[in-house]
Structure formats: structure tokens, C-alpha cells
Amino acid sequence: MKTIVFATDFSRGSRKAAQVAAQTALKANAKLVLFHAYRYVMPYDSEMSMLAVSPKELEKHSIYMLKRLQKRLEKKYTTALNTEIIVEEGLVVDTLSQVLEKTNADLLVMGTVGDSLLGGRFFGSLATSMIHHSNAPILLVPPKAKYSSFNNAVLGLDFRYDLDEVLLEKAVFLLRDLDSVVNLYTLTDESEFAKAASLKVRQLLKNVPHTYTIVEGDNFVKSVLSFANTNHADLIITFPRKHNLLERIFVGSNTERLAFNDEIPILSIL
């Protein structure tokens, strides 16, 4: 990895994600880009416009907050941490997508909650919505994540859907940088098919230390979380399937449901 982007809303809930982003950047010897998007809303009431904060003031405050975060991370870890600050005006999803492309980011890190229940749902939904807009892998960090390094990862495979080998190769490169042992975990109702399909996966992972477990069942999210907790995993890796709009509204994805667990970060390979 060369560049990691951390997107923040400056909430207490994002602090754990900031620490994970910094530690991952240090381990991978990568540059860490601290990003925040602000949005200026014109007051409808002319009397209220006198009290409104100007776009320039919003930008200035955003830069101040990012610099404060930058200093806090350097103090906690090391001044050798290579950081850059980017502030953009606009919608988070749009501006963040542009920054990921501009910086050629190898990884996006976001927290899954904000401060309040409403804020948590809002920023958490922004984080998971990036699954449908980002070309870079996304690391979603819950507020109770315990991280020093990713040593024990669970790679959840759902062979009901085709697995993109290009994405799997991305995962292999990331795992090499993270120096993590991988537990391949497959939930299926056709064990013979899964065994055959897993041969390709294991071939690609031949240079990555790994184990393999296959279980018959149909509740992928519940089963993967149970396996990860039982084996004290510190990371779950998923390959999100492309959903149409109706599926995203009424069903959601396994990755989105996994992302709202309290403790284990989710690495979504896109």
C-alpha cells in the first residue's frame, strides 16, 4: 500500500477509526490522507443569514480540526507518520470518491458511527454507502474495535455468487502488507461445489498463511460473526456483491450488516 485515505466527521465515534488508519499506515509504510467534506447551506430566512457561517469559515474550521487530529496522531504514535490534509466542499460521497481517484488510494478507512444515535446512523450509512461508489477497498471500523495490528483475519466466502479473481488478488496484496494470518471461511449448502471452488482461492493464497473451514448453512452474516468471535479474529474480509437499487433499499448487503457489529473491523474488497 502507498496511500490510505481516512474520512472523518470529527465525532468521538471516528477516533478509533483514526487510530486504526494511523497504525495501518505505519505498518504498511504508507501515506495517510486525512479527509473531511463540509457543505455550505444557504439560509432561507434572510434574518437568519446574518448568523450563518460563511463557506470560508467552514473551510477554515475544517482545516483546523484536521490539523488538530494530525497533531494528536503524531503525538500518540510518531512524527514519522506521513500525513496530508484534504478539505473539500460538497457531498461526502461525491467529494470522497473524487479524492480516492485523485490520490490513487489503496485503502479507505471510515468509522461506522457518529456521536448520536441519529448521527451514528447517518455517518454509518455514509460509510457503508461508499461500498457502492468506491474503487478502493474500504476498512470499516466499529467504535469498540481493539487494534494493535491485524494478525488474525477471517475471509468470508459466499460461493452462491461468482468470486472475482481480480478482487481476490487485491485482497492478497493487502494481506501481505498487513502480515496477517487468514482463516478462509465458507458457508454453503453445496459442500462439494464449495470444495472445488475453494481450490482456486487457496492457490491464489499459497503465499499467505491460511486455514480453511467449510460449514453448511444459509445465514452468512450470523455464521461469519460467530466464527470470527470464537476464533478471536481482529478483521473480517468480504467481497460485496453488486446490488440493484431495490435490493439495497429493502434487503441491504451482507457487508453492510456485518459492518454494524460493535467490535470487529470489516475490510470490504472492491
Image: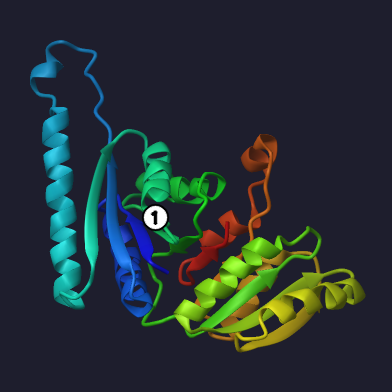
Foreground pick, 204 / 245: 204
Q: Residue 105 appears at what percent x and percent y?
A: 41, 57
Q: Quadrant of residue 39?
A: top left
Q: Residue 191 appears at what percent x and percent y?
A: 88, 75
| Horizontal side, residue 178 vs residue 52: left or right | right
Q: Is 171 above or below relative to 89?
A: below
Kindly identify the amino acid type of the residue bearing the numbered disc 1: Val
Q: Residue 11 appears at what percent x and percent y?
A: 27, 54
Q: Residue at x 13, y 58 (%)?
A: 68
Q: Is 162 above or below relative to 118?
A: below
Where does label 1 land, which residue? 113
Q: Residue at x 67, y 47 (%)?
A: 242
Q: Residue 198 appears at what percent x and percent y?
A: 79, 76
Q: Residue at x 63, y 62 (%)?
A: 167
| Horizontal side, residue 174 vs residue 92: left or right | right
Query: Looking at the figure, which quarter contains the C terminus?
Result: bottom right
Q: Residue at x 34, y 67 (%)?
A: 21
